[in-house]
Amino acid sequence: MVGSTRHTDTDDFTPSEIAAFRAETPGCRSVVHLNNAGAALVAKPVLDKHVAHLQREADIGAYEAARAAAGEVRAVYRAFAELLGCSPQEVALAPNATWAWSQAFLAMPLQSGDRILTAQSEYVSNYLAYLKRAKEVGATIDVIPNDEYGQIDTNALLRAIDERVKLISLPHVPTNGGLINPVAEVGRIARAHGIPFLLDACQSVGHLCVNVDEVGCDILATTSRKFLRGPRGMGCLYVRKRWIERLEPPVFDPQGAQWVSSDQYLLRPDACRYETWEYSVAAALALGEAVRRANAIGLPRIERRLVGLAATLRGNLNAIENVTVHDLGAHKGAIVTFDVNGLPAEAAMAALIARGFNVNITKPAFTMLDMSRRNLPDLVRASVHYYNTDEEIDAFCAEVATLARAPQHE
Ligand SMILES: Cc1ncc(COP(=O)(O)O)c(C=O)c1O
């Protein structure tokens, strides 16, 4: 039987607020969207911003529309600065999190023998880049073990530090489960030893309170389409002021640098040196709207609701016979991964989508160190946002229970 334990702090959002969020989110009318770690549903005002600028481009010309929107574009940087607790000059827009992260990581002056410390929960794209630098310059990748909760063991991190460590880099929230790495403790260690700290906050910005000074990271990359509820095709990079001038991006163009003479260029002094000139102004404006909306609701409230809804989901899935939840972490966030015993994750996902529940799957190839260590197959991933309701979670768990009881499991 599916339990109905509630963990949502209902005082945080009134039912009428939730109803209003749902009313302004067209997707809530047609699906139960539990793929927010993939791409969340955009709110109508965000969609309107996006479409209005596209319309303007069609009406008056794209360069002309960009010129007219220049003030609004600057406000996008201010919105991110408010969200992350930094200055707008430390913010760069990017086409996605991987691009943002790579512009900074590939700028790191690593040499043979330099060590990169990372976590077991590291994401595929980041690890591929470590491998590239290891191959090209002879840097060493050291994966810090987990503690008993499955998060990075900060004592082991401390013990691993020596004069050859030139970067600490890890995901805040991995793609494959509820784990929230203890990043503020990592930041304290990094600062105490003067080591740059690069945070992959792709799954945490818009989901958890992420203040760059509280976390103590020097660089942070995130994406638009996930918990921020922005459009696809945008991301954001934060680089702490004192690091901007030290890191020359691998790719720049007239947006980031000035061609001064036949043998000279001059990079911009702000984080826009990591940007390239061509981008979707419409998507940037829509992302700005999404960030402003997150700021207005307040990340502490959003975090409490997401953590509460996910705890309800996790608890109720755990109570279903033949269903196993695989999330790690002393504190868990909005992402819940599980398997329905004996049913391939692809088939479970297809069955759930056919019944109106959007979920995704997470594969060992995305977080190979963690999934292979735990010997896990593909898992179903359900991830909540504040517009999800307890009733949706009950209906979803009932559907999963039906799948778990299906003849192939008897
Ligand atoms: C933890 C993590 N890091 C990085 C990325 C890459 O983000 P993007 O696809 O925006 O480049 C993802 C994408 O799912 C992710 O989950």
Image (cartoon, rainbow, N blue to C red):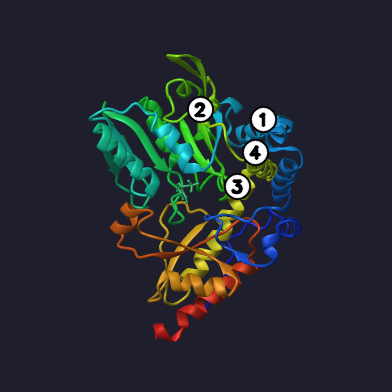
The mark nearer the N terminus, 1 or 3, is 1
Left or right of 164? Residue 254 is right
Amino acid under disc 4: Val
Circle 1 sits on which residue? 74
Q: Quadrant of the C terminus?
A: bottom left
Please identify, in this view, whether the residue under mark 2 or under mark 1 is nearer the observer: 2
Q: Considering only order in the chain, which callout, 4 or 2, is on the residue closer to the N terminus?
A: 2
**Mark 1–mark 3 CB contact (< 8 Å):** no
Q: CA distance from mark 4 to mark 3?
A: 17 Å
Q: Nearer the viewer, mark 4 or mark 3?
A: 4
The local secondary structure at tag 4 comes to: helix
Residue type of the residue flagged with mark 2: Asp
Closest to the camera, between mark 1 and mark 3, is 1
Residue in view at x 45 percent, y 73 percent? 347
The label shown at residue 253 is 2
Q: Nearer the viewer, mark 2 or mark 3?
A: 2
| Residue for badge 3 | 228
Mark 3 crowd level (few <14, some 14–19, many ≥20, 10 Å Cα) = many
Q: Nearer the viewer, residue 278 or 110?
A: 278
Name the amino acid type tagged 1.
Arg
Q: Which amino acid type is marked by label 3? A: Leu
Does the residue tagged 4 have its C-beta within 8 Å of any atom of ligand 1? no
Task: State the SS at label 3.
Answer: loop
Q: Nearer the viewer, residue 296 or 95?
A: 95
State how far apart marks 2 and 1 are (Cα). Answer: 19 Å
Say what secondary structure mark 2 lies in.
loop
Foreground label between 1 and 4: 4
- Would you name the residue on which mark 4 appears? 281
In the rendered image, residue 328, in percent from the top left (x then y), is placed at 40, 56
Work out whether mark 4 precedes mark 3 in sequence or the reverse, and give the earlier one. 3
How far apart are the two marked residues, 1 and 4, measured between alpha carbons?
11 Å
